[in-house]
């Protein structure tokens, strides 16, 4: 199916799922810690506190490095909505940017798991970005799999009159 403008995109769902799980795990650990403090087995409370601090540290890393955007791409601008999960506004691009602030459409090729079992469900996937010039953030426009990112990137590049660049290279094993 060819891409048409305006193009509505939402590449945040993967990270929303990861972050909801991380926030849920933090909530369960905090409830367990509170219960443990009132039940007074202090070694258990200390152990839960250490585990919660570790999980909280990982959650902060996930929030800081999450990628994904929600918005609308038109022929002259990209409008990016705030990326919100469970009422928390995540870091990342937001606002309206004219297309002259972007230098290319970038297709980031990522390899899938290396297995000999074709039924494993994994495989190469891609993220298609609108690459910002200096001072303009990159915007994730599409998540694709099985090498469809190259086609999506070429279509977006043609629609926006921007060059298409590819980065990364999936590892392929053929038997």
Image (cartoon, rainbow, N blue to C red):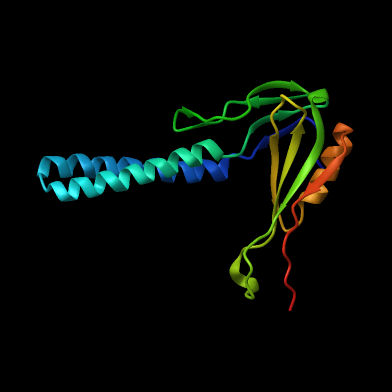
29 lies above or below 120: above
Residue at (16% x, 45% y) in the render: 36
Instruction: Residue lying at the far bottom in this picture: please name it.
Output: 175
Tell me the quarter of the image containing the C terminus: bottom right
36 lies above or below 134: below
Location of residue 13 by image quarter = top right
Q: Is residue 36 left or right of residue 162?
A: left
Given residues 41 and 150, the one toward you in this image is: 41
Given residues 1 and 20, the one toward you in this image is: 20
Res 1 seen here: no
Res 137 seen here: yes
Q: Position of residue 4 (x, y in %)?
A: 81, 36
Q: Is residue 97 left or right of residue 62?
A: right
Residue at (55% x, 29% y) in the render: 91
Residue at (65% x, 72% y) in the render: 118
Q: Position of residue 135 (x, y in %)?
A: 71, 24
Q: Position of residue 116 (x, y in %)?
A: 64, 75
Q: Is residue 26 left or right of residue 121?
A: left
Q: Position of residue 147 (x, y in %)?
A: 76, 56
Q: Is residue 50 left or right of residue 106?
A: left
How many numbered marks appear?
0
Residue at (63% x, 40% y) in the render: 11
């Amino acid at each position: 199916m060819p891409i048409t403008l305006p193009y509505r995109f939402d590449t945040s769902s993967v990270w929303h799922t990861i972050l909801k799980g991380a926030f849920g795990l933090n909530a369960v650990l905090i409830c367990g810690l509170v219960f443990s403090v009132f039940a007074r087995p202090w070694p258990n409370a200390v152990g839960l506190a250490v585990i919660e601090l570790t999980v909280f540290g990982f959650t902060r890393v996930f929030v800081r490095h999450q990628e994904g955007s929600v918005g609308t791409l038109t022929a002259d601008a990209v409008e990016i909505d705030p990326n919100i999960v469970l009422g928390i506004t995540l870091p990342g691009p937001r606002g309206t940017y004219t297309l002259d602030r972007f230098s290319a459409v970038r297709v980031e090729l990522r390899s899938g798991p290396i297995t000999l079992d074709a039924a494993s469900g994994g495989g190469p996937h891609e993220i298609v970005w609108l690459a910002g010039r200096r001072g303009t953030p990159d915007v994730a426009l599409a998540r694709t799999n099985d090498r469809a990112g190259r086609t999506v990137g070429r279509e977006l590049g043609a629609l926006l009159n921007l060059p298409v660049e590819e980065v990364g290279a999936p590892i392929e094993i053929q038997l």
